[in-house]
Image (cartoon, rainbow, N blue to C red):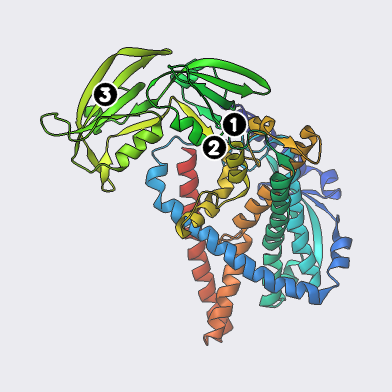
Amino acid sequence: MEPQLLALIILAILYVPTFIFVKRSKWCKEHGLVTSSVLIMLKTRWGIDLMTRLGKHKRFWRVCGVVSWIVTAILMIGMVSILVIDMLIIPKMSSTAGLGVTYVLAIPGINPVLPIAYGWIGLIIAMVVHEVAHGIQTKANDMDVENTGIIHCIVPLGAFVEPNNDQVQKCSRRARMDLYAAGITTNFFVAMITFILVFCGMTSGISSDYGDNPAVFGIADSSPAFDSGIPNTSIILSITDDTGVTYETNSLSDFFDNITHCGTYSVTYNYKGTIETKDVVLGTFIYKVMAGSPAHQGHIEDESMIYSITKIDGERNPLEKEVIIGSHLDFSKFMSNTKPGEKILVKWYGYDDGVLGTELKESGITLGDKNDVGYLGITTNTAGFGFTTPNNTIAKGINPFNGRDTVDQKLYGLLSFVGNAFGGYSPVPEATHWWYDSNILPDDVFWVVMSLIFWIFWLNLVLGITNALPAVPFDGGFLFMGGLSFILEKFGMKDDEKRESLVERIGTAVTYVTLAMVVLVILVMVI
């Protein structure tokens, strides 16, 4: 069992007697500590005077209200789009291993993605600005804030601002929509401001002596990379081939282009300031052969190295010149020029425990079909290494459109950008910090500041867009019904009772559909 999940279970067990004590205690009630449903709430008057003073600028907050409607509508459409896209790719998602239940809980220290210190600071800021925004709009629309406070259920769940419910029910539709939209939009604007700070810090606040050098970022088990002992995040400086010629690797293309064949190379690398050289088997490494694929039927083995590929006829006579395969890019280039049904001869070596086999094996294969291109059915990489560059890592961490050219690619990049945090980007993986030098602060201080600002950005963004879902009890659910009521009224449905009854039915249906999609996506992610 995951340690985080075990800790959550222990907290849940301890919560039961705590809840019973608070429910029965007169002292707790006298000091604002009360229960509601399964929640423990601490009711206070914190911040109400500030909300009252800020809420006096009614004209300003009225303009902010209109802006909030627009921003929330855009975010709502974006969130629904994400859910629809997730529903369409569920078959692909279901074929991968689940993250685990702890990844779904937005609790720093329980969720492995959220660091304890940065996570709690970011989460508290996000919750406070969200609720304060609700309180200011409440006051700006001449309603009272009864209480503010904290909600707890096993773990702290958030802050709250409690408007006078009778006044909320009697106020205008516009005032209610201002109230519900305020938190979402404030979170979004805080996220945008902090994102700009991260962007500026990462683009002008740091530099790297190895900006375009190939950097190891991921090592496959049981591969030449794994057996070489070269550490993850190493910077590759040069490679020397089996003829003794050395090539500097100032870019990824320098590295890949000079792997001309499968064989042993000497690789010189820098790891946290220490420069070493090690012999490594480089070439196209077959990490996995897909079951039932043409490669599987041709008896190609997992964890082997491709030597060459030749197009052949039915008698195994060559139709074209034999192509010697170096890096996995050579393999990809060859396969991109094949067609379904073509026959190829694959020559390959076995690989075992750091040693390249001496027997050159052959497999005659008829290619399958994948999007009108020849399909072999193997997963490959260069010797088991994953590569990036320091500059590419920064670009991925701060630019959702990095490497995306078409409109649909840019849209997907925007939608998936938030998910970078699950890959360790905050804004870049902590293990890569040594690649960079700060130009404005001591390195350690710079990364503390950048990490804190990033998590403030990320948690405000997530809280804002989640609340934009068109489902009650999220703010977006109430806004959806308010907007629908407005549209129906404009289209001639003047009877308030009939209109609100219809809005209630439609809103309930949309809530159920939205929540069903959310639950389904979460289940697929977890299991």
Query: Can you give x and y, in whole percent of width and height, for residue 281 in the image?
Result: 43, 18
Q: Please, which residue is most extreme toward the left here?
A: 315
Amino acid type at image mark 1: Leu
Between 204 and 74, the one nearer to me in the picture: 204
Q: Which residue is mark 1?
A: 5
Amino acid type at image mark 3: Lys
Residue 160, compared with residue 74, is above or below; it is above
Tell whether 169 sits left or right of 254.
right
Number of on-image labels: 3
Label 3 and label 2: CA atoms lie apart by 45 Å
Residue at the spot 73% in from the left edge and 39% down from the top edge: 118
How many C-alpha atoms fall within 10 Å of the one at disc 3: few (<14), some, or many (≥20)? Answer: many
Query: Can you give x and y, in whole percent of width and height, for residue 357 in the image?
Result: 33, 13
Q: Which residue is mark 2?
A: 101
Q: Secondary structure at mark 2?
A: helix
Query: Can you give x and y, in whole percent of width and height, for residue 304 in the image?
Result: 34, 21
Q: Quadrant of residue 133?
A: bottom right
Q: Quadrant of the N terminus?
A: top right
Q: Which residue is mark 3?
A: 347
Q: Secondary structure at mark 1?
A: helix
Tell whether 53 sits left or right of 381.
right
Between 3 and 43, the one nearer to me in the picture: 3
Label 1 and label 2: CA atoms lie apart by 8 Å
Label 3 and label 1: CA atoms lie apart by 48 Å
Residue 176 appears anywhere in the view: no
